[in-house]
């Protein structure tokens, strides 16, 4: 049995069947087939150009690999567990098809640098996808901000009503968060874009390879600078999962708000039926499953980050088999982040807001108390003193079941004779919102300008 292995030469006993299954990665690394073939073609071309192997062999290798690619894509390729991983499955099949030439492909290369290049190629493509989904979500947020421009909702601190804000302002807060996520993804893509191939098993290779050529063939910005680091580095995967964890944290906070806003207690929004499910016992229920599940899936991405950090912790240089455990957390993170972003983009676009309910909620909880204090400050009263005066008037309102804007002139006068008839116009919800018009504030003109800026940047 060991005779079937590509590395069988020094073995006299076959691999135990269960050990074979236990150590194989083919079940999950087969998704690297395209990148593995692309890397091998670039490597073979370089071997030919450098006269390390004959050009005729290069041609056979390339057509053989293209044939394998077509077969895998057609679902016509038997992956074998006894061939352990995607690299050996493809190489063994190539040698079976083209003979000698196929056996020359692995010259000057090791699976250690091969797997490193495959993952980088794969992740580089996936980051482009993640960014595309981030863009779709930002578009949906901008759509909501624009469609509902002018709608006022309560802004919260401690989940207690704080000050009125525009619903659009709230949506744009998420645009800021997701655009930072995009920046982190772009940053990660830039740093991962170096070629580890040519590091060999760990020390480099004795053949006169041309790494710069392979780097440019595979669109990497340059070859890596140290062979040991090239085969033992998984920082790029960790960076991606870290950036993904922050991204999922943002989605989870958004989920939490959508779930709260969908309750009958808040009742600020209605999620489309297609993103909710019912209950098998309670006929009235419409549950916000999608945001709940995304909030839940945040946990698995954090788990993936912990898993890979722990795999890498204390690993001596260079490659260790432990590192085969990098793939499942990485792939699961990619799938989870892409799926969550995609479903969120659609759900956010289809969500309907209940502007009247939001407005009424914004009018409760003395959300305009700061505006009364600011009014007094404009008449010359120091802010701390104004704070005290308004605090007393709020207590009076609570005792008398009134809102601030319902106090009579005489009642206001009792708190401060600096309060004139113009107080009423100064503390409407619209006035409160529009007064906050410095850069970054919730005033309608500011938010409008932000929407325009963000749309132009797209
Ligand atoms: N399947 C292996 C992995 O994913 C490929 C590298 C194997 N290298 C080795 N020396 N066993 O890590």
Image (cartoon, rainbow, N blue to C red):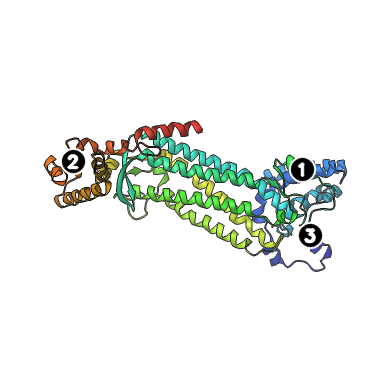
Judged from the image, the secondary structure of the residue bearing numbered disc 2 is: loop
Report if the beta carbon of the residue with label 3 is closer than 8 angstroms to ligand 1.
no
Q: Which mark is residue 74?
A: none
Left/right of residue 351 with respect to residue 389 in the rendered view: right
Identify the residue under disc 3. 5
Badges 2 and 1: C-beta atoms under 8 Å apart? no
Badges 3 and 2: C-beta atoms under 8 Å apart? no
Q: Position of residue 317 (x, y in %)?
A: 71, 61
- The residue at 59%/60% (across/down) is 309
The earlier-in-sequence mark between 2 and 1 is 1
The earlier-in-sequence mark between 1 and 3 is 3
For the residues marked 2 and 1, what is the alpha-carbon distance in whole angstroms?
76 Å
Q: How many residues crowd mark 2 within 10 Å: few (<14), some (14–19), many (20+)?
A: some
- The residue at 38%/42% (across/down) is 170
Q: How many residues crowd mark 1 within 10 Å: few (<14), some (14–19), many (20+)?
A: some
Quarter of image, res 304:
bottom right
Q: Which mark is residue 418?
A: 2
Residue in the foreground of this view, choosing between 193 and 351: 193
Badges 1 and 3: C-beta atoms under 8 Å apart? no
Left/right of residue 143 with respect to residue 188 in the rendered view: left
- Residue farthest along the left direction in this orientation: 410
Residue in the foreground of this view, choosing between 180 and 85: 180
Q: Position of residue 138 (x, y in %)?
A: 47, 39
Q: Comparing marks 3 and 2, which lies closer to the viewer?
A: 2
- The residue at 67%/51% (across/down) is 30
Residue in the foreground of this view, choosing between 405 and 167: 405
Q: Position of residue 152 (x, y in %)?
A: 31, 39
Q: Comparing marks 1 and 3, which lies closer to the viewer?
A: 1
The earlier-in-sequence mark between 3 and 2 is 3
Quarter of image, res 6:
bottom right
Whether residue 203 is visible here, answered yes or no, is yes
Identify the residue under disc 1. 212
């Amino acid at each position: 049995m060991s005779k079937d292995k590509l590395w069988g030469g020094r073995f006299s006993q076959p691999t135990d069947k269960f050990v074979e299954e236990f150590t194989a990665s083919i079940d999950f690394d087969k998704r690297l087939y395209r990148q593995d073939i692309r890397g091998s073609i670039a490597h073979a071309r370089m071997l030919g150009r450098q006269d390390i192997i004959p050009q005729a062999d290069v041609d056979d290798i390339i057509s053989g690999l293209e044939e394998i690619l077509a077969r895998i894509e057609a679902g016509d390729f038997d992956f074998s567990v006894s061939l352990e991983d995607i690299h050996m499955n493809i190489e063994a099949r190539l040698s079976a098809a083209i003979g000698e030439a196929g056996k020359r492909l692995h010259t000057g290369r090791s699976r250690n640098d091969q797997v490193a290049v495959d993952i980088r190629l794969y992740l580089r493509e996936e980051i482009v996808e993640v960014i595309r989904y981030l863009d779709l979500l930002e578009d949906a947020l901008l759509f909501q901000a624009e469609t509902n421009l002018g709608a006022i909702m309560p802004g919260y601190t401690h989940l207690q009503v704080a000050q009125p804000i525009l619903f659009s302002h709230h949506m744009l807060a998420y645009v800021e968060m997701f655009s930072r996520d995009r920046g982190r993804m772009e940053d990660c893509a830039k740093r991962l874009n170096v070629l580890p191939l040519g590091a060999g098993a760990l020390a480099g290779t004795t053949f006169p390879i041309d790494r710069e050529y392979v780097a440019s063939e595979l669109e990497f910005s340059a070859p890596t600078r140290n062979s040991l680091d090239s085969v033992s580095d998984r920082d790029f995967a960790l960076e991606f999962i870290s950036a993904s964890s922050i991204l999922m944290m943002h989605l989870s906070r958004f989920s939490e708000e959508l779930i709260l806003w969908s309750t009958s207690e808040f009742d600020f929004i209605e999620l489309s039926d297609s993103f909710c499910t019912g209950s098998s016992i309670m006929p009235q229920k419409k549950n916000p499953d999608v945001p709940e599940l995304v909030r839940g899936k945040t946990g698995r991405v954090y788990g993936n980050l912990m898993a890979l950090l722990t795999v890498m912790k204390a690993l001596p240089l260079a490659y260790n088999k432990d590192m085969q455990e990098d793939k499942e957390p990485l792939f699961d993170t990619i799938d989870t982040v892409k799926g969550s972003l995609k479903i969120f983009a659609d759900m956010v676009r289809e969500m309907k807001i209940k502007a009247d309910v939001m407005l009424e909620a914004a009018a409760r909880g003395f959300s305009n108390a700061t505006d009364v204090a600011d009014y007094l400050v404009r008449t010359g009263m120091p802010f701390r003193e104004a704070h005290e005066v308004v605090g007393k008037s709020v207590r009076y309102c609570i005792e008398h079941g009134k809102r601030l804007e319902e106090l009579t002139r005489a009642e206001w006068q009792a708190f401060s004779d600096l309060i004139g008839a113009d107080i009423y116009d100064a503390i409407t919800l619209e006035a409160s919102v529009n007064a906050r018009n410095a850069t970054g504030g919730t005033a309608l003109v500011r938010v409008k300008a932000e929407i325009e800026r963000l749309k132009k940047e797209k």
